[in-house]
Image (tube, rainbow, N blue to C red):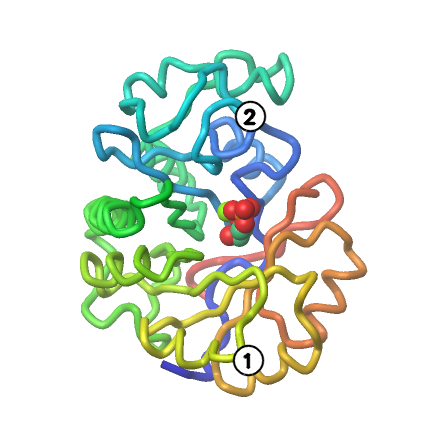
Amino acid sequence: MSHYRRWPYPRVLAHRGGGALAPENTVAAIRVGRAHGFHGIEFDAMLAADDVPVLMHDDRLERTTSGRGEVAAHTAAQLAALDAGTWHSRAFAGEPVPTFEAAVRECRAHGTWINIEIKPAPGAAERTGDAVARATARLYADLIRAGGDAPAQIEPRVPLFSSFEWKALAAARAAAPDVPRGFLFDRVPPDWRDELDALGCASLHTNHRHLSRELAVAIKDAGYWLFCYTVDDPARAGELLAWGVDAYCTDRIDLIQPDAWSPDE
Ligand code: G3P
Ligand code: MG
């Protein structure tokens, strides 16, 4: 699905909602990102035990919450009762693990665009892709249009899915075919073009540390959007944009400025 339309979304996203300034993947983080002027964010969506999507990066609770054990062993209600803020700083004490729906509603209420990273726990790729896509289709039903995953048909307020997991993206495509997709790689593999085409992806997302200028040019010449994570040095951000990278996310929302963006441009 190669194309040559320009990236229609914000070019600088707050990683995990509010970068390093707030506890990742919380509603508080989304508010901090917004308060710093970010029109777009990236966050991670995982399934709770009752198949409710929640915002979470790790498949275990210890690093970012007051809980213990596997995320997938806890219901969304149990996760909501945990403290997902104190690990970051006392100012965020008591901040809950949000449901995906609560996070999306917070974003939609304020016009914040989302790159939804589908982040399955081990063995749950298809279920997670399916559940996140179904929830997205329901929460954006007023904006999603037939064929909307094709770059020429993109509605810039509708989120972009991304995932490292092939099965998650395939399930998302089956459940919400009109929501665009990006394939996420740490290191871009030699057969990247086949992988993107097989999933009908509009974009390629990758770790900027392993990206070369030559590879960036090849991806752009092939007509795909190119997104980098996680760029925390303004000089490096400038270099990547000069290579043709369309957009990136950052943890340093205190250091890197958001871009001016409007979905109506
Ligand atoms: O989606 C970009 C980036 O978030 C991927 O890595 O581990 O921070 O989710 P990670
Ligand atoms: Mg992520």
Q: Residues within 10 Å of mark 1 (few under 14, many from 20)?
A: some
Give the residue displayed 48% in from the left and 83% down from the top: 223
Q: Nearer the viewer, residue 188 or 144?
A: 188
Q: Helix, strand, or loop for circle 2? A: loop
Quickly name the residue at label 1.
219
Give the residue displayed 43% in from the left and 59% down from the top: 263
Horizontal and vertical percent for residue 179? Answer: 29, 61
Q: Answer with left or right where residue 17 lies relative to residue 230.
A: left
Give the residue displayed 58% in from the left and 15% down from the top: 86
Specify whether residue 118 is in view. yes
Horizontal and vertical percent for residue 239? Answer: 76, 68
Q: How many marks?
A: 2
Instruction: Work out whether 102 lies above or below 177.
Output: above
- Residue 176's image quarter? bottom left
Looking at the rendered structure, the kind of residue marked 1 is Ile
Instruction: Work out whether 34 lies above or below 93.
Output: below
Specify whether residue 39 is in view. no
Residue farthest toward the right in the current orientation of the protein:
235
Quickly name the residue at label 2.
63
Assess whether mark 2 and mark 1 are in contact (beta carbons under 8 angstroms). no
Q: Answer with left or right where residue 170 lies relative to residue 186.
A: left
Q: Helix, strand, or loop for circle 1? A: helix
Q: Earlier in the sequence, mark 1 or mark 2?
A: 2
- Report how far apart the C-alphas of labels 1 and 2 lie in the structure: 35 Å
Ligand 1 within 8 angstroms of badge 1 C-beta: no
Residue farthest toward the bottom in the current orientation of the protein:
221
Looking at the rendered structure, the kind of residue marked 2 is Arg
Give the residue displayed 77% in from the left and 53% down from the top: 233
Q: Answer with left or right where residue 120 lies relative to residue 138.
A: right
Q: Residues within 10 Å of mark 2 (few under 14, many from 20)?
A: some
